[in-house]
Image: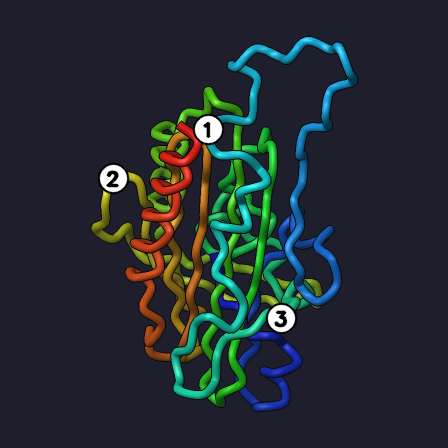
């Protein structure tokens, strides 16, 4: 998944545009990059039997997904300049060649994510310093029989298969070359890799977490990897465990 500097900001600074892919969830997000939940099951009519547990949304509920996103203005990389919510969907990658490498090079549309989610929340944040920092996140819930280990194996295969220069473009069809990095060491519930746009200073760390019925992705971008990506992943894993214990 890609680097996400807004094009309007990039052009004003005279730096190369850094794009990210528009996700289905972001495409329907509310204005101002407010979060959106998709697929929350409707309440049953009075007297209607509850569905079997195997068809339920799982131990973590769609309504809990906001807890798996970093609150706006709660993170500062540069003193006095916290990251704040910004709708970046107009400047995200919209396609890639080879197409199957889209999930390994870009944030958005979430091609790595299975499509049978029961809820999904996304948030994008950035600061206003010259060497901008960004945090892009999405979390999704799945039915209780979700195969988290199988999903992670598929994500690792995609990243490993895409260790090649990938052509990617945003909604302006301007093509950029993205270089996905190899898988990096991490804990079993996480897939971690980096991407870099060829000729640009920025580098992005990608982590996809899967546990029980939830998938959470964090992408951090900066010129010098100054965002503490591993700390955010550790915090997200701890929050998932907390939610699991609260619903067990």
| Mark found first going from the N terminus, 3 or 1 | 1
Which of disc 3 and disc 2 is earlier in sequence?
3
- Image quadrant assignment for residue 230: bottom left
Q: Name the quadrant of the C terminus.
A: top left
Point out residue 125 in the picture as x, y percentages from the top left corner: 54, 69
Looking at the image, which is closer to me, 226 or 183? Answer: 226
Label 2 SS: loop
The answer to whether residue 43 is left or right of residue 120 is right
Q: Residue furthest right?
A: 45
Q: Residues within 10 Å of mark 2 (few under 14, many from 20)?
A: few
Q: CA distance from mark 2 to mark 3?
A: 32 Å
Foreground tag (1 vs 2): 1
Residue in the foreground of this view, choosing between 89 and 172: 89
What residue is shown at x 75% (from left), y 10% (from top)?
Answer: 47
What residue sits right under mark 1 in the picture? 59
Residue under the point 55% across and 50% down: 66
> Which residue corresponds to mark 3?
86
Pointer 3 local density, CA inside 10 Å: few below 14, some 14–19, many at least 20: some
Disc 1 to disc 2, C-alpha distance: 20 Å
Q: Residue at x 63, y 51 (%)?
A: 23
Distance (Cα) linking label 3 and label 1? 31 Å
**Residue 138 position in % (x across, y down):** 53, 51
Q: Secondary structure at mark 1?
A: loop
């Amino acid at each position: 998944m890609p680097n996400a500097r807004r094009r309007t900001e990039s052009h004003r600074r005279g730096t190369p545009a850094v794009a990210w892919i528009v996700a289905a969830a972001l495409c329907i997000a509310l204005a101002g990059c407010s979060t959106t939940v998709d697929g929350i099951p409707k309440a049953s009519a009075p007297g209607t039997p509850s569905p079997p547990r195997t068809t339920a949304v799982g131990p973590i509920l769609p309504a809990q997904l906001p807890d798996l996103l970093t609150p706006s203005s709660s993170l500062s990389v540069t003193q006095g300049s916290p990251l704040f919510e910004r709708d970046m969907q107009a400047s995200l990658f919209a396609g890639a060649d080879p197409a199957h490498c889209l999930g390994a090079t870009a944030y958005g549309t979430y091609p790595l994510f299975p499509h049978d989610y029961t809820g999904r929340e996304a948030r994008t944040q950035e600061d206003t310093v010259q060497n901008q920092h960004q945090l892009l996140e999405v979390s999704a819930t799945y039915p209780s029989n979700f195969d988290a280990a199988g999903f992670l194996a598929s994500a690792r295969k995609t990243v490993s298969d895409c260790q090649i220069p990938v052509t990617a473009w945003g909604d302006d069809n301007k093509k950029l070359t993205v270089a996905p990095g190899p898988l990096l060491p991490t804990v079993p519930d996480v897939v971690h890799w980096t991407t870099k746009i060829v000729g640009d200073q920025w580098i992005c760390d990608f982590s996809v977490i899967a546990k029980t019925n939830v998938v959470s992705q964090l992408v951090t971008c900066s010129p010098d990897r100054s965002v503490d990506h591993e700390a955010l992943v550790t915090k997200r894993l701890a929050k998932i465990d907390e939610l699991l214990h609260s619903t067990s």
